[in-house]
Amino acid sequence: MRFRTSRRRAQSASLAITLSALAGAPSASAYQLFDSGGFSANANLNLRMGFRHGEEINFGKGALAGFGQIFRSTGEKSRNDLEVAAKPFLGLKYQLDGSELYSGVSVVGATTTLDGELSGQMARSGDRVLKTDHAYLGWRNKTFDLSFGAQEFSVGDGLIIGDGNFNQGHDNGQYWTGAFGAWRNTGILKINTSPIRADLYWLRTDADLGGSDVVGINVENSSIERFGRLGLMYFEIVGDNNKGLAQGVGFKGMKAMGVRGADLHLPGHPEFKIYGEYVYEGGRSELTGIPNDGAAWYVEPAYEFESLPWKPRLHYRYSHFSGDTAGTRDNEEYRGMFFTIFRRDWDTWYQGEIAGEFHLFCENQETHMIKLKAHPAEKWAVAGLYFHNELDTPQYFGIPVRSTDWSDEVNFYVEYVPNQQFYGYAGVAWSTPDGAAKEIFGKEDQLVLELYLSYTFQ
């Protein structure tokens, strides 16, 4: 039992490190370039490739002509998408008496080729970019960690504060590979005390998310060993440029608060855990003058069958993201804004390789998910997922529909993680449109095949 538990923890740690790297974070380890007199330098190079093939794209309507062009189709019902990226990272540290200075910088070179991103919304063939992702400087000791610049930061599993870079093709060269992960600018103070720790933060998003300025606080318990983690969060959006994907939305003036739990379990029973979060969005849009009154929440119990071969883990998740109610003066639609991916697995927070990547973006959405994941061998994982998606209110990004039923989707994937350097993923997704999706797009079942490879030289 002790060996199996240690092996499972090693598998989880390896996968967590790899997923963190996929999300754009510098690798947990790197090649040491220099270490002398308290000064050290390390570096790594991450290469990633994502290939996808789609049939009956957008339920048979075909690839769209661009973001927001729901009614304009290119007519391409079948597409191949190849995205590649290279990301070198350099980290520096200087040891002081009881503390250290640190900094890091990364550069991304990325491009999208073949037919372009499958849905037609996020990246076109020929999109390419070469620019920085991380560029930060900080100081830390055992209690305080103060940093500034372009870096990653998330609260909880990234439901609302996760990623300030949307990875849209015209700015970032690609979409699905997620090569960019850093907020464009930050000021973050982490206070690591016990039993409570806190984060004070100012964050600025990229232009696709409106160049929004987010100011907030996060408070949570320091240790999760006994019963898990509980947290409270509050933030305000104090500025934006009202451009990119946020144009016409007006994030400035929003105030949000939330409570969450992660890895919640009874002492002595780590096989059963519960995850959950509730977020309320209030305040008033300074662009439109309309009050915000949106909310989102989810609950996700999970159970690991330790006595069975492959140690399967079963998850069920219900998530609710409010939609705007017709005939009211308030905006009840929850804005997904800055959610991220890879924090716990592929399904946080892009829920489904078709619905989550193409159509529903944690707004006006109700989703039931059932997931079964197992490890047939030390370096392998397999998973099957089912999603039932509905709209909360009968409209799709402001377009009225008669039904709130959206789609049913099945995903299956295999992961190969031989070490901390390599990650391989192969998956298939199949989705059947329901009433609302048929009104907006088409009536055909959609198929997507996927291959994702990542290797880090370190």
Image (cartoon, rainbow, N blue to C red):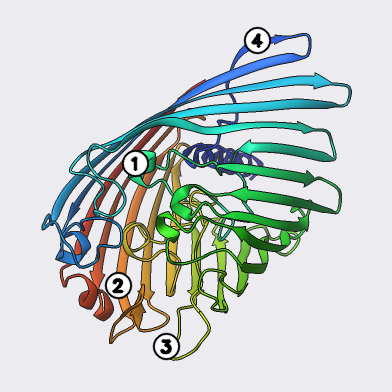
The residue to which callout 3 is attached is: 326
Label 2: how many Cα within 10 Å (few below 14, some 14–19, many 20+): many
Q: Position of residue 198 (x, y in %)?
A: 78, 52
The residue nearer to you, when weighing 76 against 16, is 76
Label 3: how many Cα within 10 Å (few below 14, some 14–19, many 20+): some
How far is mark 4 from mark 2, CA to CA? 54 Å
Check disc 4 and report its element: helix, strand or loop.
Answer: strand
The residue nearer to you, when weighing 335 against 355, is 335
Check disc 3 and report its element: helix, strand or loop.
Answer: loop
Against 398, residue 259 (above or below) is above
**N-terminal of the two: label 1 or label 4?**
4
Q: How many marks?
A: 4
Check disc 2 and report its element: helix, strand or loop.
Answer: strand
Label 1: how many Cα within 10 Å (few below 14, some 14–19, many 20+): many
The residue to which callout 4 is attached is: 34
Residue 407 tag number: 2
Quarter occupied by residue 281: bottom right
The residue to which callout 1 is attached is: 174
**N-terminal of the two: label 3 or label 4?**
4
> Residue type at mark 2?
Ser
> Residue type at mark 3?
Ala
How far is mark 3 from mark 1, CA to CA? 36 Å
Q: Position of residue 2 (x, y in %)?
A: 66, 42
